[in-house]
């Protein structure tokens, strides 16, 4: 009986989707989202939401992922709060058309680039940072003057419910909607026509989204995942590298798209790095990380089972390996003696959990060939004090970002575009880049009808053409 009702409800929510998109389309046509004041007001309301609902956000993140209060603030709430503030502060500048130079032969004239809203946009977000990754693109969509539908991940149900319950009372409901649901609802959404689709998630679903968008020629931003390598050179400051790798890998129990997926370490410093990382794990999470308030849990049973598989047949467990199915707990685990051919190193097997394989290398050229033989990652991390090596890796690998001597922090630098390349995604956002992603850069060219005497082009562009006119054109081209 309950199942039947649940099915009915889900069916009606799917049926409502077309109407919701249509109503947003009608609202957008009224032009109400266009003014700077409207956008600023919505951002102010978002800022208020962050203040008034901080405890609900934290509670939801704890229920979904057992995120500690500080981690929830540091990697989700704080990032979003800063993005709202910076966007709000700079929006007046961003919306102002930019005058660009006009070539001599087109004078007198004025050329401008004017950002304008795209229309109705769809934002589909994942479960691992279920709050941050829903809110960050929404801020960009609002700032750029769009209407938007946000589809949070059903795999983080508490955060999804919290967003659906609270966001609508802060934002203009006629312009911004939260649609909850999974594959069924997202499939229904993707049948509708949007002016932009912003998707964060895995590569396979990314292809489904891109295919659906292509039917309507809808532009997409795809924020995907992959295996980000972390290279540790023999010149690296090993204790610092260990601290930063352990933090980047085991925050959110390794369920971070830009977490170091695996470590490639110079054979000479392998043992030191392994021991330093073990010490750091103990320092961060205690002798039994299961008891630590600061260590998260795996999102669900399916991911827990998937990660269990990585603990067998993939080298030897150097530290960790303890599990508890009831709690979906997997200890921070480091694997050593891992072969590059093992299943955990499969080019498509993004680990997305607290298991870190470490592979030793002898020749840095092999490392570069290895990284370049695989899909382009979101990030290449390098720990090195050697300037030549830093340049060499940076210049000879391709990735969404290149990070020297730290992990994860690049995601919080609002002046840096955040996004992948190749298999790790297309397009980028954060800060001004988000505003640009959700805007059309309209080219505006204005020419006066007076001042004919000074209208340079009028002497050469109109027929009858002649060798003199062509020569003049050549002179000014
Ligand atoms: P996912 O691709 O399974 O799901 C993402 C979203 O797509 C969810 O909202 C889900 O409801 C929807 N979805 C799932 N299957 C669908 C289908 N068949 N048709 C239509 N929609 C569907 O991803 P996930 O498991 O939520 O997230 C993990 C992945 O996301 C990892 O690969 C990770 O690297 C990547 N990720 C990337 C970034 C980034 O910024 N680049 C950030 C976080 C996560």
Image (tube, rainbow, N blue to C red):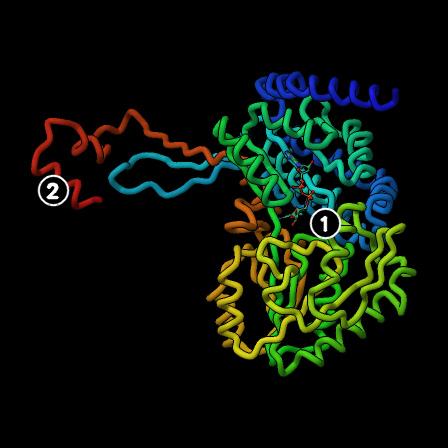
Residue drawn at the location 81% of the way across and 74% of the way down: 279
> Among all residues in the image, which is located at the extreme front?
313
Give the side of residue 377 with respect to residue 49, left or right. left
| Mark in the foreground, 1 or 2 | 1
Secondary structure, mark 2, is helix
In the rendered image, which quarter contains the N terminus? top right
Q: Quadrant of ligand 1?
A: top right
> Among all residues in the image, which is located at the extreme bottom?
268
- Give residue 5's quadrant in the image: top right
Please tell me the numbered disc located at residue 79.
1
Rendered position, 67 above or below 210: below
Rendered position, 81 above or below 274: above
Give the side of residue 457 with respect to residue 354, left or right. left
- Residues 36 and 414: in front is 414
- Give residue 409's quadrant in the image: bottom right
Residue 19 appears at what percent x and percent y? 66, 16
Rendered position, 31 above or below 180: above
Residue drawn at the location 86% of the way across and 65% of the way down: 285
Q: Which residue is mark 2?
A: 471
**Can the viewer see residue 404 in this picture?**
no
């Amino acid at each position: 009986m309950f199942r039947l009702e649940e099915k009915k409800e889900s069916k009606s929510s799917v049926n409502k989707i077309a109407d919701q998109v249509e109503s947003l389309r009608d609202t957008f046509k009224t032009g109400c989202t266009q003014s700077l004041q409207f956008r600023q007001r919505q951002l102010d309301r978002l800022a208020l939401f962050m203040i008034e609902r901080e405890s609900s956000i934290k509670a939801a993140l704890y229920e979904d992922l057992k995120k500690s209060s500080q981690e929830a603030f540091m990697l989700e709430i704080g990032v979003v709060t800063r993005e709202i503030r910076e966007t709000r502060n700079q929006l007046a500048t961003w919306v102002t058309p930019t005058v660009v130079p006009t070539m001599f032969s087109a004078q007198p004239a004025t050329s401008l680039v004017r950002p304008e809203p795209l229309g109705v946009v769809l934002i589909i977000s994942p479960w691992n940072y279920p709050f941050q990754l829903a809110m960050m693109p929404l801020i960009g969509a609002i700032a750029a003057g769009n209407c938007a539908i946000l589809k949070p991940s059903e795999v983080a149900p508490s955060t999804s419910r919290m967003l659906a319950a609270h966001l609508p009372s802060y934002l203009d409901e006629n312009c911004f909607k939260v649609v909850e649901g999974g594959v069924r609802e997202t499939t229904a959404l993707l049948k509708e026509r949007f002016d932009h689709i912003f998707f964060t998630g895995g590569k396979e679903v990314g292809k489904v989204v891109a295919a659906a968008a292509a039917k309507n020629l809808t532009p997409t931003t795809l924020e995907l995942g992959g295996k980000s390598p972390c290279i540790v050179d023999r010149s690296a400051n090993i204790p610092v590298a260990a601290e930063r790798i352990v933090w980047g890998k085991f925050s959110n129990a390794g369920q971070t798209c830009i977490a170091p997926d695996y470590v490639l370490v110079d054979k000479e410093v392998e043992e030191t790095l392994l021991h330093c990382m073990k010490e750091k794990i103990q320092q961060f999470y205690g002798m039994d990380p299961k008891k630590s308030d600061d260590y998260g849990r795996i999102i669900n049973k399916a991911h827990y089972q998937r990660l269990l598989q990585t603990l067998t047949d993939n080298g030897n467990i150097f530290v960790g390996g303890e599990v508890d199915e009831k709690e979906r707990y997997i200890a921070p685990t480091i694997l050593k003696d891992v072969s590059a051919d093992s299943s955990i190193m499969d080019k498509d097997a993004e680990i997305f959990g607290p298991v870190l394989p470490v592979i030793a290398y002898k020749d840095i050229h092999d490392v570069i060939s290895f990284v370049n033989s695989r899909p382009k990652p979101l990030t290449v991390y390098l720990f090195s004090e050697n300037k030549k090596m830093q340049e060499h890796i940076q210049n000879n690998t391709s990735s969404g970002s290149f990070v020297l001597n730290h992990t994860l922090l690049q995601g919080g630098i609002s002046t840096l575009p955040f996004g992948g390349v190749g298999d790790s995604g297309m397009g980028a956002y954060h800060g001004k880049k988000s505003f640009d992603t959700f805007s059309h850069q309209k080219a505006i060219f204005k020419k006066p009808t007076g001042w004919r005497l000074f209208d340079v082009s009028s002497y050469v562009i109109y027929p009858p053409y002649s060798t003199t006119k062509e020569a003049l054109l050549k002179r000014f081209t």
